[in-house]
Amino acid sequence: DGSLTKGGIPMGDHTVKIFDGKSQVFAFAFHAEPSAMPTLAGPLGASRAPGFVVASLAGSAKVYATPGMRGGVADQAPNPIPPAGLDIAAAGASETHLVIDDGKGKPRDLTVDSSALPVLTVILSGAADRVPVTVTANVPDGSVVVNGFIKGHLVNGSRVIQLEAGNWTVKVTHDGYQDAPEQKLQLKAGDTSPQKLNFDLAAVVSNATLSISSAPADAAVFIDDVRAGTVNGAGSFTKEISPGSHAISLRKPGFEELKITRDFKSGESAKLSGAMKSMSSLALKILPAAAHITVRRDGDSADLVIANNQSSPVHPGSYKITAEAQNFEPKTETVQVDPGKTVSLDWQLKPASGPVVAKKGADAFFENGPSWKVESGWWIHDVKGYSFLRNSPGVMVFDLLKDQHGGLFKKVRKIVFVADYRNEKNKILYTLDGHNLTRRVYTDGSAGEDKKVPHGMEANSSYRIMVELKPDAITIKNGAGKVLDTAPRSGGGGKFGFEDEVGVAPLGR
């Protein structure tokens, strides 16, 4: 079609020669350097095919021409092009347009290539008039396809092509993207006005495949803190996953939680090892059987309540263990728990030598009972910090009175309570307002997405919630027994309690 596009020319000195059959009609030498505009070795002399050469870089240009030609920026009068070339400054944010006049016909319009790579454009007189068409797209290096044939490639999302009069279809293609619809051009003879075409290609999104192997059977798999499935009996798990960054975690009672965060690429098959470390455990047998047992690992900010006469999974570390029972002397001991090991303690508390004052009021129920006060028949907790229950396993029922009763929602708009609390970075935070129960899980300081569910108790005179704490799960129901939320527990004996300034709690409830 009378044109040639060639890329990948190495740096250095080169000579261009154009032949008509065996007869040379045009020639010039140039020098190329990285990130610099090409320079011609000398003026263009007379030739059988008069023409011009435009060296360009990022919208700036230098025009070289055979003798007798005039040129300049499109909105200015053309001037004679000197033998050493005519410098053209970039037009800033817009494209740079040139007008070249050989004095033998209609002046030729040319759009300067705006790419960040050095470009040489050679146009000879005598060829059919061509229209500069600027093709842009949202992919930086897409292929420009004209009438079914690749005409060239975009550079930084742009390319100028020259087309003769006639009907053309143009599109841009790129691997990993859907082809944008073809655009049609009808160019008439004698019309050399620059044309512009823009294409917006949509990326082809294909999921990645997550494959987990060597994991404990029946381990729960979570993706971004949402339960995604269960490891099969062979220790493997496979699931499609959207491209992007995801947090993968495996949880199973008796094992330390395995956490992996990584980027997943479209179409990738990502293989992860699910090998989990066995948790350590404390096996405590304390007499009397009703003893209240708390443990605190060195470095943690709060105690954990663990059950008597059974093995409780814990993380490795140094633990301070305390056992208390009414009418018995408390006992405390520090033990070292090694990874994957079980530490067993068999204690019999000594009877108290004198009368023991039984815990009364809030102190019998809450670890920080003295921070509660009594006002008009209510226990009130309005100091900063959590108020944890002394015993957390089992089922607990709470009645929350609405403001018409002078109760819980008179001073506050929501109630916040915490479950499975191990430390500030690892806990489940619940918020109960007039319409919804909201749950947010914190893992190693990272907050998961809120899960909000209507509790359906707006019409009731009071809100009743039932909390069932099992070793591996927390279930919350409304007063009608409808399950509002179920969340997995860490297996580490996390505590249950209310956040600071919870409001009021009635005596005897």
Image (cartoon, rainbow, N blue to C red):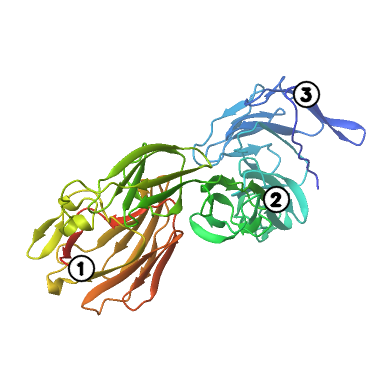
Q: Mark 3 points at which residue?
A: 14
Does label 2 or label 1 sit earlier along the sequence? Answer: 2
Residue mark closest to the camera, 2 vs 3: 2
The answer for how far apart the CA atoms under marks 2 and 1 are is 67 Å
Left or right of 174? Residue 388 is left
Left or right of 271? Residue 443 is left
Q: Which residue lies furthest to the right in this view?
A: 22
Residue at (62, 44) in percent of width and height: 140
> Which corner quadrant holds the C terminus?
bottom left
Q: What residue type is labelled 2?
A: Asp
Residue mark closest to the camera, 2 vs 1: 1
Q: Name the residue under label 2.
A: 175
CB atoms of marks 2 and 3 within 8 Å: no
The answer for how far apart the CA atoms under marks 1 and 3 are is 94 Å
Residue mark closest to the camera, 1 vs 3: 1
**Residue count near mark 2 (Cα–Cα under 10 Å), binned few <14, some 14–19, many ≥20:** few
Q: Quadrant of residue 52?
A: top right
Left or right of 342? Residue 334 is left
Q: Which of 310 and 165 is in front in this view?
A: 310
**Residue count near mark 1 (Cα–Cα under 10 Å), binned few <14, some 14–19, many ≥20:** few
State the SS at label 1. Answer: loop
Question: What mark, if any, has residue 509 been given in the picture?
Answer: 1
Residue at (54, 31) in percent of width and height: 89
Does label 1 or label 3 sit earlier along the sequence? Answer: 3
Q: Position of residue 465 (x, y in %)?
A: 30, 70
Q: Which amino acid does label 3 sit on?
A: His
Q: In which quarter of the image is residue 448?
A: bottom left
Q: Where is residue 387 in the image (x, y as percent from the top left)?
A: 24, 53
- Is residue 344 visible in the rendered structure shown here? yes
- Is residue 206 visible in the rendered structure shown here? no
State the SS at label 2. Answer: loop
